[in-house]
Image: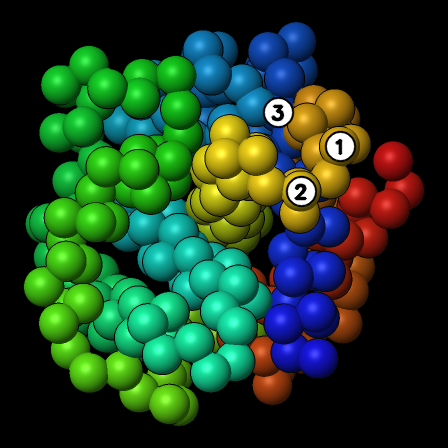
Amino acid sequence: MKKLLTIGLLFATMGATALLTAEESSSSFSAASIDLDRPGAPWAVTATNYESLNASEQQLYLDAYLETSYFILYGMVPPGDAEKEQMLSAMAECARQTHSSDKWNVELVWRSGELLDKSAAHAYYEAVTSVVCKPFLKSPASNDSEPPQFYTVDDWRSFSARQQAIYLAGYLDTAGAFAERMAAQGSTDVPIALWPLLETMSVDQVLTFVNKQELDDRWALPRSIASGVVTAVTIQ
């Protein structure tokens, strides 16, 4: 039941992933005041606008990536799969121990000329996470792995509109990175209607739906805001 619930929310969520088109780039991320005149739509934060985030905002985006990655992976791990449970435990511990370190330097990826047309979350996923978290894969799996939690629903409520938009951009970019990889691998779990939906809404629009929901303090932040993203998808 846990897997079905999380997977259902995940793929409904991914239907709204990034939700930015080149045509609406001048206004689609106004809450964060980030210039979106860049290649790689529908991604929100890319090599061309990442530097417009200050250090604390870059950290917020990274933390959103780490929290959301765990949320997605949690829904993909079959109960009793020891190998994948170990990976999940390792990812959680890696996130907790390294999230504030300089190891998560996405700009090094872009300077090498790689993934310039993708989001920062995509670069974290494809080129950084495996390097940073590899040592943690040797750790024994925990049967009760706790998610990495850097922010709570109460924190979300105290965020400025810009902070909420940046966190949500990290959430959507991360879901999109996972979705793109799964689609490339031929996964039948990715809805056919996913990619057309990527171009229908802006981060600000999705944020409006998220903030109309009664967020549940019992859940981790990515799980809590998922219902608002799902609502945004269902009206399309």
Of callouts 3 and 2, the N-terminal one: 3
Amino acid residing under circle 3: Leu
Which residue is denoted by mark 3 in the rendering? Answer: 20
Local packing at callout 3 (Cα closer than 10 Å; few below 14, some 14-19, many 20+) is many
CA gap between label 3 and label 2 equals 24 Å
Q: What kind of element bears circle 1?
A: loop
CA gap between label 3 and label 1 equals 19 Å
Is 194 positioned to the left or the right of 89 in the image? right
Disc number lying in front (3 or 2): 2
Name the spot of residue 132 as percent of width and height, x first.
14, 53
For the point 15% across and 78% down, the residue is 139
Quarter of the image containing the C terminus? top right
Which residue is denoted by mark 1 in the rendering? Answer: 192
Amino acid residing under circle 1: Ile
Of callouts 3 and 1, the N-terminal one: 3
Name the spot of residue 70 as percent of width and height, x first.
42, 64
Disc number lying in front (1 or 2): 2
